[in-house]
Image (cartoon, rainbow, N blue to C red):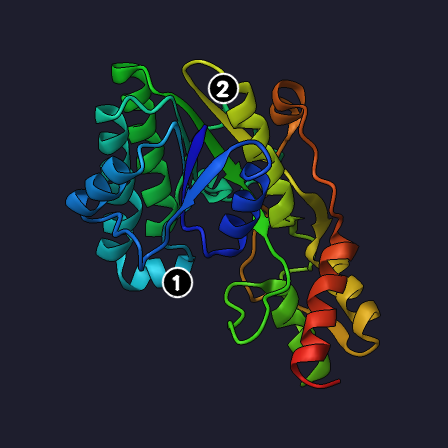
Amino acid sequence: MLFHVTGANGIVGKEVTRALEQIGDVHATDMEDMDVTDSESVKKVFNAHPPDAVIHLAGLKGNLPSREDPLKFFNVNMSGTLNLLEASRHLNVGHFVFFSSLTVHGPTAEAINERSPLFPLHPYSGSKGASENIVHAYSNAYGINSTIFRPNFIVTAIPEPQPYVDNLIYDFIRLALNPGVITLAGDGQFEREWMHPSDVASAVAAAVTTNRPGCETYILRGERVTMEQFARRIVAKVGKGEVTTNPNMDGFSIISSGEKAEKELDWKPKVDLDGLISMVWEEYQARHGR
């Protein structure tokens, strides 16, 4: 069985590639190999290596970057997904796995599940929500078995020389060390969930092995903590820093239920938050010669 993994050079893509190599052959691509926004580029690569299943990880992410260039985000995330699905349709690909985001639901005070309404707040989450609809349409119209994953925050250590981007553990480590203060929004009680990319990869392996008919959506839930608990664990690990709050800073919770993935895919995350913090802290020390 040949798996095609897009976005294979990312932190999740590398883990997914490793996991799938244990159960089949993998053709891994990234920006330098295939431009997902170019339908001819996608067709050329797919025709050269016809996949049995596609795992689509390539895309742009981030709230603020998407607000600055929404057209680029919709082009890459939505049109890119459409091009991959169209190529998959012509080659009778048996399974299409799409990575969305829990941010498609917007802020929530209670744990959301796969049936909760979508309420995207920015172009990034909007482009993911729109792409989900395209996946559903192709699954319904052309019989492509599909899996949509909505993970929460995915973090891990990033080896040099790659920079850290959108990694709050790393950001809080820097703040704890200099200037020595981590300031949280509101009262610090907003909640988030955190997971390691290897746990995401194990969910992909479970989905392609199960290959349920139709189009199924799964939320991937990590360890849930308040932002205060999150910050204090980082301070305890680095041995320095204070945690304060600012009621004038806006914040919100993004929390979920992982019952469906646990029941249907027999999936649970294995790496806990303390393990994630330790990984990033160890890499930080090596990177900065501490």
Q: Which residue is mark 1?
A: 64
Which quadrant holds the N terminus? Answer: top left
Q: Is residue 112 above or below residue 194?
A: above
Task: Give the secondary structure at mark 2.
Answer: loop
Q: Is residue 135 above or below residue 177?
A: above
Task: Please give the label number shown on residue 272.
Answer: none
Instruction: Pick whichever, 97 or 250, lies toward us.
Output: 97
Which quadrant holds the C terminus? Answer: bottom right
Q: Position of residue 139 (x, y in %)?
A: 32, 20
**In this rendering, does residue 111 appear at all?**
yes
Q: Is label 1 in contact with label 2 (beta carbons under 8 Å)? A: no
Residue 188's image quarter? bottom right
| Side of 261 relative to 165 (left or right) | right
Residue 84's image quarter? top left
Task: Judge the density around disc 2: few (<14), some (14-19), many (≥20) Cα neighbours within 10 Å.
Answer: some
Instruction: Pick whichever, 181 or 33, lies toward us.
Output: 33
Task: Give the secondary structure at mark 1.
Answer: helix
| Side of 149 relative to 154 (left or right) | left
Instruction: Pick whichever, 255 or 264, lies toward us.
Output: 264
| Side of 135 relative to 170 (left or right) | left
Q: Position of residue 271 (x, y in %)?
A: 73, 47
- Which mark is nearer the camera, 1 or 2? 2
Q: Is residue 206 above or below residue 29?
A: above
Q: Which residue is mark 2?
A: 211
Q: Is residue 24 above or below residue 279?
A: above
Q: Amino acid at mark 2?
A: Asn
Residue lying farthest left? 40
Instruction: Pick whichever, 149 or 95, lies toward us.
Output: 95
Q: CA distance from mark 1 to mark 2?
A: 35 Å
Residue at 67% x, 25% y is 262
Q: Amino acid at mark 1?
A: Leu
